[in-house]
Amino acid sequence: MTQERPVWSSKLTFILAAVGSAVGLGNIWRFPYIMGQNGGAVFLVVYLFLILTICFVPMMAELALGKHTKKECVKVYEDVSPKLKLLGYLNPFTGVLISSFYFIVGGWIVNYIVKSLADYKITDYASYFSSFVKDEKSVIIYTLVFLFICIFLTARGIKRGIEFANNVLMPLFAVLLVGLLIFSLSLPNAHLGLEYMFKPDFSKLNGHMLLSALGQALFTLSIGMGALLTYGSYIKEDKSITKSAYTIIFSDTLFALLAGIMIFPAIFSFGLEVDSGAGLVFVTLPYIFSQIPHGNIFAFAFFVLLFAAALTSGISILEVSFATITERFNISRIKAATILFFGVGSISVPAVLSFDKLSNYTIFSKTFFDFLDFVTANIFMPLNALILCLIAGWCYKIKGDTIIKNVVLAKLFDIGLKFVIPVVLVVVLYMGLK
Ligand code: PHE
């Protein structure tokens, strides 16, 4: 029995789901920490430049390929030539690798929610993060709880849940972020954070930073692992995708900037390290909440909303593998859920252990957790985006004028898809890895 493919009930549902996929931990957790490791404002300039010039093309190509073929991503590649099947599999594979660290960060959030509920004194956990991540049993449990919730919701189908999370919770999250940002700006020395974020020092520009900015741009916009292709494949034929692409880019960038303006002034005000890595936000936020009257309530609200944002992104990451497993092997969603739970879980566990017991085992001088994060965003996603542009432009012959109304933009899209973007991706990959 072949399974019926889902379709979005309306255009709005699709846009909300796509924005939900984009806005997540990439904006609130990953963006500030990667920016902090890459020199601040100059990174922001490069990142914004890439978002505005480069990312639109692969994003449109992914959505258009999905909408046009109505297939899961491996089949999209295989239909061009059976030899490309393996490259197709690189998409869900990237998704599984992303999941295995994304859900750990989700687990951290669940822990912070529990702690704020238990009326844990926020000041107690100002330095709490570094000891918490070493409490491996708890982190593994929280990670699996978050993974389970996400897989359960994805297994039930793509539409339910997503609409509520995006319609109600995301606007609420934006409002809370603005509130916290205003507070953060009122702290002593806040201007140092703003300078760090907005006063670029172009002498810090280098190939490695360029690749980090590209990786972050692709990661935050969910480009380059089949998520947008899969969501695009559930669109009904007559819906246009250009406005959706603008909406995704606009909302995602807005959330990243709000997060940055909330975090950086606080980092400088409290004298924390900007380049401390993956724990940055989880160390800074408790400081902020500890300064606010009734900080627990704000902490609770913040982490619940961040949880919702992570959930809608997590669902989109998992949906790629769900689509591939169920459609290619004709396996039910429940069985696919079980396979994914154990598959992702078994990579997550060593990643959790890499914060303590396995911290001496490094790959290219990165712990396993950092390596997963680095290799997916900075290598697999640009690579997948590159292959996808080539396939969409040269094999499926996706034409700008069939998906974009504006004639000039449509022409630019054609040239970008077949020539400019693939070349830029190769150059940035080369410069960054050299
Ligand atoms: N864009 C998501 C975020 O910012 C993460 C993600 C990556 C989702 C890749 C789907 C695909 O959190």
Image (tube, grey):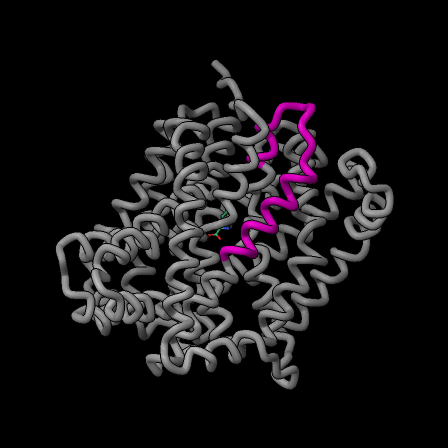
Extent of the magenta region: 230-255
Q: Residue 41 location, x and y as percent?
A: 57, 75
Q: Residue at x 61, y 79 (%)?
A: 200
Q: Residue at x 47, y 36 (%)?
A: 319
Q: Residue at x 44, y 51 (%)?
A: 174
Q: Residue 278 location, x and y as percent?
A: 39, 67
Between 288 and 111, the one nearer to me in the picture: 288
122 on left or right of 429: left
Residue 357 is at least partly visible in this image: no
Q: Main secondary structure of the magenta part?
A: helix
Between 269 and 253, the one nearer to me in the picture: 269
Image vertical order of residue 227 relative to residue 215, above or below: above
Residue, far bottom: 203
Image vertical order of residue 51 relative to residue 307, above or below: below
Residue, far top: 1
Q: Quadrant of the C terminus?
A: bottom right
